[in-house]
Image (tube, rainbow, N blue to C red):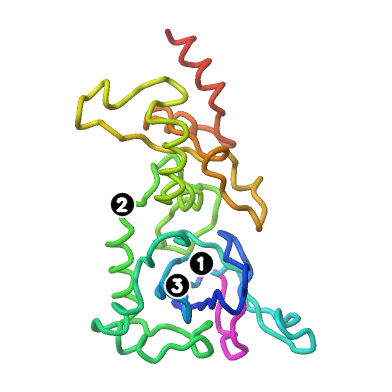
């Protein structure tokens, strides 16, 4: 499995922002990309610069009409993120990448034009994966949230893309500010149950299944996210599609 870098200039694309499943441009000489290859996604030109996402390619690059000049041909590839951080600081800031070894050997010369679809040398890709794993290890989903139906290359780590919504710190904070820290299914409060150590602790659940979400979907933390305890969150994901909150409440009432 090869690893590539995709780049993004928010200034050039205007309001166009990447989605969890998307089609992204790459330069014509990047046609060796195949389904299952790994990519990292880097924001350039506009601060804060750095790597903000990772994922897998869903197919080979294909030609299409240039997104900016309709008289030109561009190359595009379908991608799927496993992690995408749009709101906060980059997971791997550009200043870190261009100054720390071994990353500086590759990233100090990266530009928007050179970067879109360039292959990352294997030794740097391995170091990058270790650093990425270290910085995102706390973002792993519960086992029952993993998409078992998705296909992954052998040895790849499986992560649920909905977690990109649920772990977003700003969306999570807005959800909890509106709905509070009490589980909306069972009513549990960690602070009441465990005391001070449980204060402010709760998980958030994304109400819309990914297969119901369109490419241009933007999460609304008030309407789309809801606080739930880990037990209820686990039960919600025991089925595909997930159980809704009303169904879980009925289960709890029957159990009582």
Q: Nearer the viewer, mark 1 or mark 2?
A: 2
Residue count near mark 1 (Cα–Cα under 10 Å), binned few <14, some 14–19, many ≥20:
many
Q: Nearer the viewer, residue 105 or 156?
A: 105
Q: Which residues fall within the magenta stretch?
A: 25-36
Give the residue at mark 2: 138
Q: Position of residue 50 (x, y in %)?
A: 40, 74
Secondary structure under badge 2? helix
Give the residue at mark 3: 40
Whether residue 213 appears in magenta in the rendering, the answer is: no
Residue occupying image coordinates x 49% and y 9%? 254
| Residue 234 vertical position relative to residue 97 in the rendered view, above or below | above
- 160 displayed left or right of 199: right
Q: Nearer the viewer, mark 3 or mark 1?
A: 3
Figure quadrant of residue 181: top left
Which of pointers 3 and 2 lies earlier in the amino acid sequence? 3
Q: Position of residue 133 (x, y in %)?
A: 31, 62
Give the residue at mark 1: 56
Of the 4 image quadrants, the one containing the N terminus is bottom left
């Amino acid at each position: 499995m090869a690893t590539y870098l995709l780049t993004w200039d928010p200034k050039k694309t205007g309001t166009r922002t990447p989605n969890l499943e998307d089609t992204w441009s790459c330069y014509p000489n990047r046609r060796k990309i195949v389904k299952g290859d790994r990519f990292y996604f880097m924001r350039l030109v506009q601060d804060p610069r750095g790597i903000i996402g990772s994922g897998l390619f869903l197919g080979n690059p294909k030609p299409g009409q240039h997104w900016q000049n309709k008289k030109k041909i561009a190359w595009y590839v379908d991608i799927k993120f496993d992690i995408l951080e749009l709101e906060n600081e980059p997971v791997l800031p550009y200043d870190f990448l261009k100054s720390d070894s071994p990353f500086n050997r590759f990233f100090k010369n990266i530009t928007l034009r050179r970067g879109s679809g360039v292959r990352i040398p294997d030794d740097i890709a391995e170091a990058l994966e270790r650093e990425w794993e270290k910085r995102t290890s706390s973002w792993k989903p519960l086992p029952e949230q993993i998409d078992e139906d998705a296909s992954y290359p052998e040895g790849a780590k499986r992560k649920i893309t909905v977690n990109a919504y649920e772990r977003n710190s700003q969306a999570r904070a807005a959800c909890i500010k509106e709905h509070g820290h009490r589980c909306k299914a069972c009513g549990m409060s960690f602070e009441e149950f465990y005391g001070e150590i449980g204060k402010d602790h709760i998980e958030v659940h994304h109400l819309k299944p990914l297969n119901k979400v369109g490419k241009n979907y933007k999460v609304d933390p008030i309407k789309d996210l809801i606080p739930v305890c880990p037990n209820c969150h686990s039960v919600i994901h025991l089925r595909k599609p997930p159980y809704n909150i009303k169904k879980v409440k009925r289960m709890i009432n029957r159990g009582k």
